[in-house]
Structure formats: structure tokens, C-alpha cells
Image (cartoon, rainbow, N blue to C red):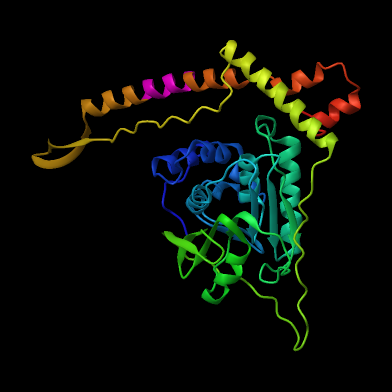
Amino acid sequence: MGGAVSAGEDNDDLIDNLKEAQYIRTEKVEQAFRAIDRGDYYLDGYRDSAYKDLAWKHGNIHLSAPCIYSEVMEALKLQPGLSFLNLGSGTGYLSTMVGLIIGPFGVNHGVELHKDVVEYAREKLDDFIKNSDSFDKFEFCEPVFVVGNCLEIATDSHQYDRIYCGAGVQKDHENYMKVLLKIGGILVMPIEDQLTQITRTGQCTWESKNILAVSFAPLAQQSRADGEKPDAVQLPPVTVRSLQDLSRIYIRRTLRNLANEDSQGKEIVQRVPQKRKRRRCRRRRINTYVFVDSQLIPQMVESEEEEHAEEEQKEVEEEEEERDIGDIEILKQVNLLRDQIMALPLPESLKAYLLYYREK
């Protein structure tokens, strides 16, 4: 499933294409997509396919097409402080983007059938927190992943404001999914070959809206011996943050705001510039005929228009290369939040805690 937009050269180019095709329509969704490089969730050797609008699968690891994730993120209507449940959380790519929007006072849980995929998702999450340049630019709700079948969630589990299911749901499982949703909440899932948005309007009332025609693999059910009782999946608990953790959040928020005000005063550009589309000039040739030994022979001759087009194309590329170099120089700046923290008169161990033990 996918192929709705052109392939990009990199993550920003892919996002530009999704915006142009109206799959990404809001600024907060765009920012989340730009902050998380899709290529980072591919195995080594497969990254060249990361920026195509296509699904990707290797063993148990799977990513849906970018156009699908875009529609899901928009349909969820995410806001800070909401609780989110990802059924079939996979690599954690979507959950990480959601965490950038719902922020530190949200809830971000994922259930994944395959243990090796959960381990892969945790590795990618750890890499994002420790190494991504985007981490210090957002307040983040860290996803928590558990291994289990999302059709066997314990009946006493808490409900969520937003739910996404990343596998095809059969009609007889629809009500099971709805029960996990709070009143006023939104559930997005593929059902009967339609990506569907379901809003819970009351205790026993829902409104449904078809978003997009899709083709998803159905939810998998683990095979069990006759009479064997399935293990209920216990979702992660919803816990209250410690005073220490709250202090870190608010200190970082205050310093980030100060850094942003300072950067605006100095007119420092902190966003990644969108890649410019290069103009393409078509080659044109003229059919001519020449006499050779009294014979009329056709010959292809390049036109003057072609020569001018090539010169113009060369000038355009040189000009854009100079602009791209300028953009790179603008982006070669220090992490302002990190500098603010390192300048505080605090023990090094406390500074490391405020930095989430990041090394850069």
C-alpha cells in the first residue's frame, strides 16, 4: 500500500511531497514528521527505500507507507496531555511521533505481538533520545511497549483518548476495540479495507467516518493448544510523575523558552530548510538532411535552444548549490538548550540528568 506521492531524496523531501499532496495538513503533524527521520527505522542496507511512499517489511519488522501514517496522524487529532494506545506498535516510529505532540503529561503505550520487534522499537527509541537533534526541541512523552496480542488485553484495563490499530480488524472485533476508548475519544483502524475514524460520542454511541481505501494484513492470533487459556495482556500502568521528573520537565521548558527568545532576538534560523526542487530542461533535437555522394542522409543536430537550456540549467544549479551551502552554515549552531543547562551552577551529575544523559 502506498505510492500516492513521489519518492523523496531524504526525509524533508518526502514530507514536502506529502504536504503538497495534502496528506499532511497541520503544522504540528508536519513538525513531528520532520523531527523523526523515517530512515532511522530501517535496517542497515535498506535505507535507500525509506523515502518512497511504500510499505516496507523485513521479517517481523514492518512500516506502513508514509501516506498512511500521515492520514492516521491527522485523523487522531492529537493534543498535549492525551493518552494514546498503539495496537500493533511495531518499530515505534508512529508512537515516537505521537509522543512529540502529546508531550510529557500524556500517556503513550504500545502493544506488539513479536518480542524481537519490541526489542527493536526500544533500541530505536533509546537512539532517538540519546542522539537525535530533535529531542531537545520538543517536550516528549516516551512510549512504553509491551509484548502481547492486542486481542487479549485484560478486561479491567484503563481506557484511552486516542487509539490506533496498525492491522486489519475483522468486523466481529470492532466492538472489542471500541470498549478501550474513552467517551469523546478517537479510534483509527483499518476495517473492511477502509481506514476508519471512529469517535465515541456517548456510553453506547459512536460516529464513524471512512478516511482512505487501504489493504492491511489482518490482526494475528497466536495458535494455542486445545483448551489452553490465553494469557491476558497487562497494559502498562498510568503513573504519576515524580517530583524529580517534574522538576526536570519544567527546568528544561523554562530554559528552552529562554533559548528560543534569545535565538529569535539574534535572528537565528533553527528549522531545517525545505529542499528546493531543481528545474529540468528537456533536450530538443532538430531533424536535418545532408548530401553525401549525391545521397540525402538524415542527421540529428542539436538546436541553439538546447545549448541555452543547458547553460541556464547549469547556472540554476550553481546558484542553488550556493544557497544550500548557506543553509548548512545557518544550521551549524550549538544546541542552545544544552548550553543553557551546562552554564547552570549545578553538579555535573544533575546537569547530566537534565540532559537525559545525552552526550551531544
Q: What percent of the width, then of the height, locates residue 122?
A: 75, 51
Q: Is residue 83 left or right of residue 75?
A: right
Residue drawn at the location 58% of the way across and 42% of the way down: 79
Residue sitting at the far front: 203
Residue drawn at the location 61% of the way across and 66% of the way down: 179
Residue drawn at the location 71% of the way across and 52% of the way down: 121
Q: What percent of the width, then of the height, locates residue 178?
A: 58, 65
Residue 93: in magenta span: no
Residue drawn at the location 56% of the way across and 47% of the way down: 48
Judging depth in this view, the residue of 256 and 114 nearest the camera is: 256
Residue sitting at the far bottom: 226
Q: What segment is highlighted magenta in the picture?
A: 314-322
Q: What percent of the width, then of the height, locates residue 145?
A: 74, 55
Q: What percent of the width, then of the height, locates residue 241?
A: 80, 42
Look at the magenta stretch and give its main secondary structure. Answer: helix
Q: How many marks?
A: 0
The reply to whether residue 247 is visible in this rendering is yes
Judging depth in this view, the residue of 92 and 8 nearest the camera is: 92
Q: In the figure, 111 relative to 298: above or below?
A: below
Judging depth in this view, the residue of 29 and 82 nearest the camera is: 82
Asked where in the image residue 85 lies, by quadrant, the reply is bottom right
Image quarter of the C terminus = top right
Q: Is residue 109 left or right of residue 163?
A: right
The reply to whether residue 218 is visible in this rendering is no
Asked where in the image residue 146 lies, by quadrant, the reply is bottom right
Asked where in the image residue 351 lies, by quadrant, the reply is top right
